[in-house]
Image (cartoon, helix red, strand yellow):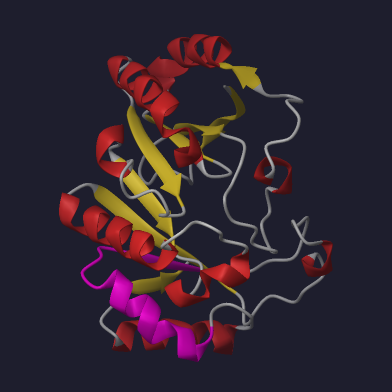
Amino acid sequence: MRFGLQKTTLLDYPGKVAAILFTAGCNLRCPYCHNPELVDGGGDGGMLSREEVSAFLKKRAPVLGGVVISGGEPLLHAAALTGLIAEIHDLGLMVKIDTNGLFPDALPRLGADFIAMDLKTAPSRYGELGCRTPGYEEKLRRSARWIIESGIDHQFRTTVCGEFVGEGDVPEMADLLAGCGEHRLTPFRPGVTLNGEWEDRISPGRNYMDRIEELFIKNKIPSYQA
């Protein structure tokens, strides 16, 4: 297994200086994804072996507080990550996992200290994102419920674009998020995307973002714009 590496981030693990490890492969095909090189898992250019990652973390552990494991979708590799997370803990570092929530059975086994789950749209619409995971609506709900009830620090995140997050989607999304500690709303931003047609799409305006935030709050979901 190989990993992409960002040596330092002050933004991706709340309250900690962290490194980010990126895994390849994803079971979604969100057209606005800004990591297209990781989605199909193709190519190892610039990626590191597990041994190289271990050596880096041992060297950097004194100045880090945590490690973020992101993707792609890291839980495609859940069996391999369990040992890596244990190794990171042995270095005195904490671990945050970024996930799309489609692997509820893997979550309890990981031993993560913080979980960030992306909720892309209403669960019933995940087929529009290329999801072919059987039972995806129920799996999303199971993941969200386990995260919320586990007592683990967590955050739910939604990239807001009009095509996938509209006023009509909010009630279904809010139902899944009931009881969560935090829900972060981020506007879609143009740039390199999985679907090139999205590279020049316009970000949702302030009025649209305010309206979506307001609707989540009215549904008793603690949401804020990032």
Question: Magenta stretch: residue 207 in it?
Answer: no
Question: Magenta stretch: residue 168 in it?
Answer: yes
Classify 215 as above or below 52: below
Image quarter hosting the N terminus: top right
Rendered image quadrant of residue 81: top left
Is residue 60 found left or right of 146 in the rendered image?
right
Asked whether 52 or 109 is in front, the reply is 109
Percent from the top left, x then y, of residue 99? 44, 49
Is residue 16 found left or right of 92 in the rendered image?
right
Percent from the top left, x then y, of residue 136? 43, 62
Residue at 48% x, 90% y: name it: 167
Percent from the top left, x then y, of residue 33? 66, 57
Is residue 187 visible in the rendered structure shown here? no
In magenta, the rendered stretch is 166-186
Asked whether 37 or 153 is in front, the reply is 37
Residue at 58% x, 44% y: name it: 72
Q: Residue furthest front?
A: 134
Number of numbered markers = 0
Residue at 56% x, 59% y: name it: 132
Percent from the top left, x then y, of residue 23? 57, 34
Residue at 26% x, 54% y: name it: 147
Classify 141 as above or below 49: below
Is residue 155 visible in the rendered structure shown here? yes
Rendered image quadrant of residue 6: top right
